[in-house]
Image: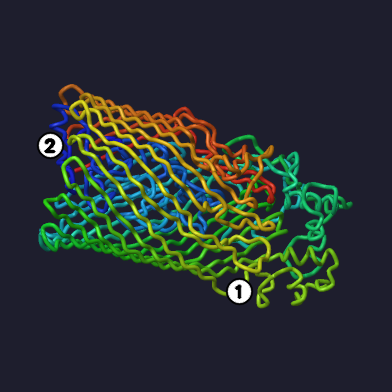
């Protein structure tokens, strides 16, 4: 656990009080040393070096010094984690793809729960949308590794990220900064502590941020007006059409506000009320077209692009990789009078050049990581807000009752062009609305002269909302309009006992029992009625006429809902119930105050659900069950060389069962518990602070994560395109190696009291898969990323000036992407290029 800070004296174990900064600096100036960090990983305040869990903890000072502004930016600093800003076709950097020790989730859909839980001041954030939190008024962040099913519960199968924001102080204080930088970056942040009375204090925090996109949309040279007909994006259903056309991608305009009230009417009672609101307007997550599929050798999987190219050429067979039946559907376009699909069949083969259409192929691959020929929708709009109340009541000197009550809402719209062309080959947009309520009760106590510590608790969680998806394939050949409703109710009881019968030995026993009920109603619809057009084109008698669609034609097409003949799902609500028992057993050895060795066995789970993305009719809503993980871990935490060297180590092995993988039914990507895996690895973290002027922080992580079993129907065989999913294949988002080295130098400027601080971060990450199938073109190459800055702190630390750069050697690699082979394209998002920034900080 790197402390990532130097000027502090050790905090007493098992206290919630941070060291006094002035005393800390004075002591550190005499002797150097490493800061201890107080965490709440076990639901009580403890010195992180005394917690028998692998934790990477980061203080606010460390986050500020390294210009870490979001959860995803922690990815380079913590071993065996991969945090990415955005998932395939999410369109927003506010979506978090979090993997810890090989377990996580790379999707934002409402039906797919994250595998790493994110907590904001103890409140669980249920969606990956909005989980990539901006870190403005953060006190610290704790990244807990391995299953945290006992104390944190559902969906912490890989680990948990705990974000702890600043609590109001009892004296007036203001701390803030203003930053400018690349792409017209402007950011201003501030936090003010405002005492109101002797027992009542408050704080207000704000953040505003704007910057231009670094990714350019440019006009396709062969698509001048009058040369080719191009259907506008507004011709198809979508959640919105903002910023359609040329321009940039990756820009943002966001602001947020947080306020807290802290009331302590007596020594035994503490009440904290908080509220926050954030508003984010973004251009879509930059999207680079990497390749198209119609001409891929052996690429018989392409459906939409190949069929479209066949259709505009006036051919039903012998062209592209699309099935002839789809060309029949194009031929019927505009003749039935029922569906909104342009009549394009044979337009490039007739005698009129004015109605010609652009084919879809590699002509739209720019070869530039930061540009495309896209013209479709280009936006993400998100509002997130909530409130929480925490009450702590000391029933006695050794027993505290704690209550955390919270309510949150999330509203999000996004629209993006994933085909990288002026065509509407893959246009995607969404609307998500979510609300959640949670109530947690904790009883925290100690007995037997502090040799026994315990946490007992109960938890209730309720979530409801919808995700409305709009997807246009192949100029409307398939036009999906799907509003899906989901509800969850979750209840749990949990407890953990930590007992030290003697000074040398500690024992941990804990467990959590969870009962969960889910419901789902799917309204996924094909507005174009593709199946009906195919049946009509092949002369199926029941579908000779499509205005209206007869019930016989509906049955012939396999559509399950008589009241909604275009709906792919059967009508009605689907229900599932889950229950889970997650135990934990651990033992610790304390041969000295500065050394602890530990071993643990723990379990965790990730809840199941239903497939919500259908593209052809099915008689039942496909469902899937939980994922489960069992982990053995051994490790030690130590401080050596008169507390100038901190060295922590953990080794682990995880049995990962029931992995939720895509399983094709027709052209529908349904999810099933289709695989098991074995994950093994280790991580070491060190901080070396021989003198006050120099600190070296470093870490190394290694993981070997491979499938040990895959259902036959879910196997993706290796090919020229993909590495495949099979026994022995690697898990996605899991590099074998990650190494970080971060030196920090602090120098006095004469005798003025001013200081110069120089920082650098080097992170090496080995190659990894970016998607489950191991698509070669999407692989994330091995990378070396360097960030660095220099800060001048004026006397009394009232003012500071920082100049720095991120990714200063412009190392570029794909962070997310998709092989949409049926749609006709491979696309992805590259990490941000080299950028500079300058920041002015102030505090008083």
Mark 1 Cα within 10 Å, few/some/many (few <14, many 20+)? some
Q: Which structural element holds mark 2?
A: helix
Q: Nearer the viewer, residue 184 or 174?
A: 174
Q: Which structural element holds mark 1?
A: loop
Taking the spot 15% from the left edge, 23% from the top edge, the residue there is: 751
Image position of 225 with respect to 751: above or below: below
In the rendered structure, find residue 571 and report the number of the disc placed on it.
1
**Number of numbered labels in the structure image:** 2
Q: Where residue 304 appears, x then y in whole percent?
A: 73, 52
Mark 2 Cα within 10 Å, few/some/many (few <14, many 20+)? few
Q: Is 201 left, or right, of 829 in this rendering?
A: left
* The N terminus: image quadrant: top left
Are circles 2 and 1 on residues that touch, CB within 8 Å? Answer: no
* The C terminus: image quadrant: top left
Q: Where residue 401 appears, x then y in whole percent?
A: 20, 62
Residue that carries the numbered disc 2 in the rendered image = 23
Colour convention: rainbow
Q: Where residue 364 appears, x then y in whole percent?
A: 69, 41
Q: Is 604 left, or right, of 772 in this rendering?
A: left
Taking the spot 45% from the left edge, 47% from the top edge, the residue there is: 98
Q: Nearer the viewer, residue 222 or 420?
A: 420
In the rendered structure, find residue 523 and report the number of the disc placed on it.
none
User: In the figure, residue 31 lies in which quadrant?
Assistant: top left
User: In the figure, residue 273 lies in which quadrant?
Assistant: bottom left
Residue 680 seen in render: yes
Q: Disc 2 versus disc 1: distance between alpha carbons?
A: 67 Å
Q: Which of 170 and 556 is in front in this view?
A: 556
Q: Is 346 left, or right, of 295 in this rendering?
A: right
Taking the spot 62% from the left edge, 37% from the top edge, the residue there is: 776
**First in sequence: mark 2 vs mark 1:** 2
Residue 378 seen in render: no
């Amino acid at each position: 656990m790197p402390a990532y800070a130097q000027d502090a004296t050790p905090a007493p174990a098992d206290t919630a009080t941070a060291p006094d900064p002035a005393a800390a600096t004075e002591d550190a100036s005499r002797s150097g040393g490493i800061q201890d960090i107080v965490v709440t990983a076990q639901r009580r305040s403890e010195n992180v070096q005394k917690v028998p869990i692998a934790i990477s903890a980061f203080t606010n000072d460390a986050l500020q010094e390294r210009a870490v502004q979001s959860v995803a930016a922690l990815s380079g600093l913590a071993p065996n984690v991969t945090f990415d800003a955005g998932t395939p076709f999410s369109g927003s950097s506010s979506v978090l793809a979090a993997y810890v020790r090989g377990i996580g989730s790379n999707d934002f859909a409402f039906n797919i729960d994250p595998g790493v839980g994110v907590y904001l001041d103890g409140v669980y954030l249920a969606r990956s949308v909005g989980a990539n939190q901006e870190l403005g008024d953060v006190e610290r962040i704790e990244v807990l590794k391995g299953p945290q099913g006992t104390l944190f519960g559902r969906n912490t199968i890989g680990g948990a990220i705990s974000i702890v924001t600043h609590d109001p102080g009892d004296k007036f204080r203001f701390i803030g900064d203003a930053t400018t930088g690349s792409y017209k970056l402007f950011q201003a942040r501030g936090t003010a502590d405002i005492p109101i009375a002797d027992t009542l204090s408050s704080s207000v925090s704000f953040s505003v941020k704007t910057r231009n996109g670094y990714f350019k949309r440019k006009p396709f040279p062969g698509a001048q007006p009058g040369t080719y007909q191009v259907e506008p994006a507004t011709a198809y259903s979508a959640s919105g059409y903002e910023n359609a056309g040329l321009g940039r991608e990756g820009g943002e305009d966001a602001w947020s506000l947080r306020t807290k009230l802290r009331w302590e009417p007596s020594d035994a009672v503490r009440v904290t009320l908080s509220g926050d609101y954030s508003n984010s307007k973004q251009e879509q997550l930059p999207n680079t077209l990497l390749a198209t599929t119609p001409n891929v050798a052996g690429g018989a999987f392409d459906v939409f692009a190949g069929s479209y190219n066949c259709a505009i050429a006036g051919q039903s067979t012998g062209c592209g990789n699309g099935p002839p039946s789809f060309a029949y559907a194009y031929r019927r376009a505009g003749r039935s009078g029922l569906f909104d699909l342009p009549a394009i069949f044979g337009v490039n083969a007739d005698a009129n050049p004015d109605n010609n259409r652009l084919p879809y192929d590699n002509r739209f691959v720019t070869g530039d990581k930061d540009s495309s020929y896209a013209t479709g929708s280009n936006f993400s709009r998100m509002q997130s807000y909530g409130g929480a109340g925490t009450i702590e009541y000391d029933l006695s000197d050794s027993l505290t009752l704690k209550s955390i009550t919270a309510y949150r809402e999330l509203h999000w719209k996004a629209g993006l062009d994933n085909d990288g062309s002026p065509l509407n080959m893959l246009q995607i947009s969404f609307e998500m609305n979510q609300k959640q309520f949670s109530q947690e009760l904790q009883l925290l106590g100690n007995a037997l002269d502090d040799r026994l510590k315990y946490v007992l608790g109960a938890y209730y969680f309720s979530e409801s909302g919808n995700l409305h998806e709009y997807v246009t394939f192949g100029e409307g050949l398939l036009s999906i309009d799907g509003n899906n409703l989901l509800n969850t109710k979750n209840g749990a009881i949990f407890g953990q006992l930590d007992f030290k019968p003697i000074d040398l030995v500690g024992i941990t026993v804990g467990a959590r029992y969870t009962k969960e009920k889910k419901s789902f109603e799917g309204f996924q619809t094909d507005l174009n009625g593709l199946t009906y057009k195919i049946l009509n084109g092949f002369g199926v008698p029941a579908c000779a006429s499509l205005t209206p669609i007869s019930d016989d034609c509906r049955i012939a097409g396999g559509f399950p809902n008589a009241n909604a003949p275009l709906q792919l799902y059967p009508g009605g609500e689907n229900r599932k119930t889950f229950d889970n028992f997650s135990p934990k057993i651990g033992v610790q050895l304390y041969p000295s105050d500065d050394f602890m060795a530990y071993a643990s066995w723990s379990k965790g789970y990730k809840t199941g659900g239903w497939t919500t993305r259908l593209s052809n009719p099915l008689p039942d809503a496909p469902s899937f069950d939980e994922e489960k993980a069992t982990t053995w871990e051994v490790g030690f935490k130590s401080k050596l060389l008169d507390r100038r060297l901190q060295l922590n180590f953990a080794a682990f092995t995880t049995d990962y069962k029931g992995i939720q993988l895509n399983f094709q039914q027709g052209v529908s990507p349904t999810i099933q518990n289709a695989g098991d895996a074995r994950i093994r690895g280790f991580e070491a973290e060190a901080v070396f602070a021989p003198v006050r002027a120099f600190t070296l922080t470093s870490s190394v992580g290694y993981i070997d994560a491979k499938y040990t079993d895959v259902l036959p129907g879910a196997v993706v065989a290796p090919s020229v395109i993909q590495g495949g999913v099979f026994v022995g294949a690697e898990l996605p988002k899991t590099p074998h190696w990650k190494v970080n080295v971060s030196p920090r130098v602090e120098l006095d400027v004469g005798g003025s009291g001013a200081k110069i601080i120089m920082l650098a971060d080097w992170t090496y990450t080995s190659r990894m898969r970016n998607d489950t199938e191991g698509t070669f073109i999407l692989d994330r190459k091995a990378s070396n990323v360097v960030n660095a800055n220099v800060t001048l702190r004026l006397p009394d630390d009232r003012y500071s000036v920082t100049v720095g750069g991120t990714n200063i050697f412009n190392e570029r690699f794909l962070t997310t992407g998709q092989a949409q082979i049926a749609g006709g394209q491979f696309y992805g998002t590259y990490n941000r290029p080299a950028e500079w920034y300058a920041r002015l900080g102030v505090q008083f």
